[in-house]
Each structure stands twice: as structure tokens, then as C-alpha cells.
């Protein structure tokens, strides 16, 4: 059985979930693991001097649990899909099983980063990010000043750390239309799937 693990990383509100869901619809034998599902409980998130909860760092995430889920997919992708109610996406034949790992800090966690055969990183400028984020409601909701006081400075810090440790990232312009982004990444992944299929 052949497998392919793709990372869709990037800035908050860059369009990672939108792109990942679009890919999931187009690619057979595919499923998504989203990093946002692994945040620790609010009571376990430290607070800084300004009262801001420190959500935008790896320590806020249950990365061991996330890694266990990825390992479970690696052991048996077919039953992983079945367990998630995705049997309808299974296709017979010499298929390649594809895992999309989506999240804002997926490349900063070394044990996860080494698993990716393809890495995409969605970028949008500061102002666009601030506007898109202001229309979202997280749980807990962003308090006033959170974007400038926590989210953006942590993005810059995490991104710098990532660039120092990871190579081979394909940067995507999140200002492009959803359709254009999906078409480009889908083509790229299809080529990778074909390459894997032809390999024996
Ligand atoms: N290419 C695009 N052009 C314009 N708006 C977009 C595009 N992609 C996504 N959006 C919009 O931006 C917002 C954030 O998108 P999405 O939830 O996919 O981002 P995300 O990177 O997964 O965010 P987060 O990690 O913060 O949850 C949504 O309102 C979505 O509709
Ligand atoms: N999902 C959550 O529990 C949660 C809670 C508070 C804030 N966030 C934000 O999610 C973004 C990543 O997608 C980060 O920028 C967090 O601030 C998530």
C-alpha cells in the first residue's frame, strides 16, 4: 500500500481549512487531520502579563495526541477512513492513500514535519489577516487587542523559527481565489500521486 502525507500550514485565516476541504473532495482515499482539534483545555493555557491566553504556540496543543492519530492513519489508512465514516471515499485498485495535515504550527513540530512529503504554506498580509480574523469567533473569543498583542507577534516568531528549520516549503498566496489555489495544489498532488503509482 502506498501513502502520501501532505502538510497544509500557514497563517491564521490564510485559508488552510478551505483549501484542505476542497482537496479532500477531489482526492480519493483521502482524509484530513486538523491541528485546531488538538488545543488543550482553556484552563491549561498560560496567560501573559497582559492577560492574553497563549494559544499561538506549540505548548497550547496536545501534539502527542495528534501524533498518535497520524500514526494510527499510517498503520492502517483504510480502517482510519472507515472509523471516521469516510468509507464512501474509498476506491479500489492500486490506490495511494493521502493524509492532509492542516494547521498553523504543523511545520514547527519536528516529529510531525519530518513526515511530510509535500509542504504548503498559506500566506496573507497583516491587514487582510486582521480583517478575516475579526469576523471569526473562536472559543474563547479573541479579547480586544489580541491580534496585535498575541496572534501577529507569535506568527512572526513561529514563522521565523519554521524558516530556520524547514526547507522545501511551497508558499501559497492566500489572496488568490479559492478556486485557483485549489486547482494549483490539486494538480501538484495528483502529479505526486501518479509518481507514487508508477514506482514499484
Ligand atoms: N482564497 C480565499 N480568498 C478569500 N477568502 C478566503 C480564501 N480562503 C479562505 N477564505 C476565507 O477566509 C476565512 C478563513 O478561512 P479558513 O477557515 O479556511 O482559514 P484557516 O487558515 O483554516 O484559519 P484558522 O487556522 O485561523 O482556523 C474564511 O472566512 C474563508 O471563507
Ligand atoms: N480551537 C481553539 O480551541 C482555539 C481557541 C482560541 C484561539 N484559537 C486560535 O486558533 C488559531 C489557529 O487556528 C490560533 O491563532 C489561536 O489563537 C483556537
Image: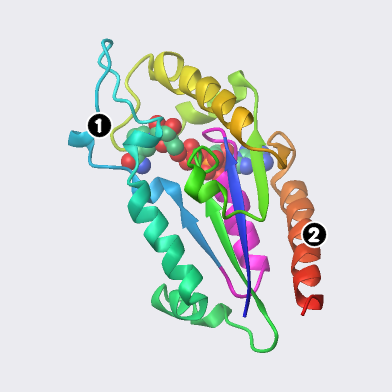
Asked whether the viewer can see residue 137, the reply is no
Image height of 103 relative to 152, above or below: below
Query: Does residue 174 belong to the magenta stretch?
Result: no
Q: CA distance from mark 2 to mark 1?
A: 39 Å
Residue 58 sits in which quadrant? top left
Callout 1: SS: loop
- Residue shown at the point (74%, 53%) measured from the top left: 185
Near mark 2 (Cα within 10 A), the count class, few <14, some 14-19 or many ≥20, is: few
Label of residue 187 in the image: 2
* Residue that carries the numbered disc 1 in the rendered image: 45
Image height of 48 relative to 82, above or below: above
Residue 2 sits in which quadrant? bottom right
Magenta-highlighted residues: 11-30
Percent from the top left, x then y, of residue 82? Answer: 44, 80
Callout 2: SS: helix
Lower position in the chain sequence, tag 2 or tag 1? 1
Residue reaching furthest to the bottom: 93
Residue 68 sits in which quadrant? bottom left
Q: 118 or 130: nearer the eye?
A: 118
Q: Quadrant of the N terminus?
A: bottom right
Q: 108 or 85: nearer the eye?
A: 108
Q: Between label 2 and label 1, give the one nearer the viewer.
A: 1
Amino acid at each position: 500500500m502506498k501513502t502520501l502525507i501532505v502538510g497544509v500550514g500557514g497563517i491564521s485565516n490564510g485559508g488552510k481549512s478551505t483549501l484542505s476541504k476542497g482537496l479532500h473532495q477531489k482526492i480519493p482515499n483521502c482524509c484530513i487531520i486538523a491541528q485546531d482539534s488538538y488545543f488543550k483545555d482553556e484552563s491549561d493555557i498560560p496567560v501573559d502579563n497582559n492577560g492574553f491566553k497563549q494559544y499561538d504556540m506549540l505548548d497550547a496543543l496536545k501534539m502527542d495526541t495528534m501524533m498518535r492519530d497520524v500514526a494510527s492513519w499510517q498503520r492502517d489508512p483504510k480502517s482510519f477512513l472507515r472509523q471516521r465514516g469516510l468509507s464512501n471515499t474509498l476506491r479500489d485498485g492500486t490506490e495511494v492513500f493521502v493524509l492532509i495535515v492542516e494547521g498553523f504550527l504543523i511545520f514547527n513540530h519536528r516529529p510531525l514535519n519530518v513526515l511530510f512529503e509535500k509542504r504548503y504554506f498559506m500566506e496573507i498580509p497583516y491587514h487582510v489577516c486582521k480583517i478575516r480574523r475579526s469576523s471569526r469567533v473562536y472559543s474563547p473569543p479573541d479579547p480586544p487587542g489580541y491580534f496585535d498583542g498575541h496572534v501577529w507577534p507569535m506568527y512572526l516568531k513561529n514563522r521565523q523559527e519554521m524558516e530556520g528549520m524547514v526547507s522545501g516549503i511551497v508558499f501559497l498566496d492566500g489572496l488568490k481565489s479559492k478556486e485557483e489555489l485549489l486547482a494549483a495544489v490539486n494538480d501538484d498532488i495528483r502529479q505526486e500521486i501518479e509518481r507514487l503509482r508508477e514506482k514499484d
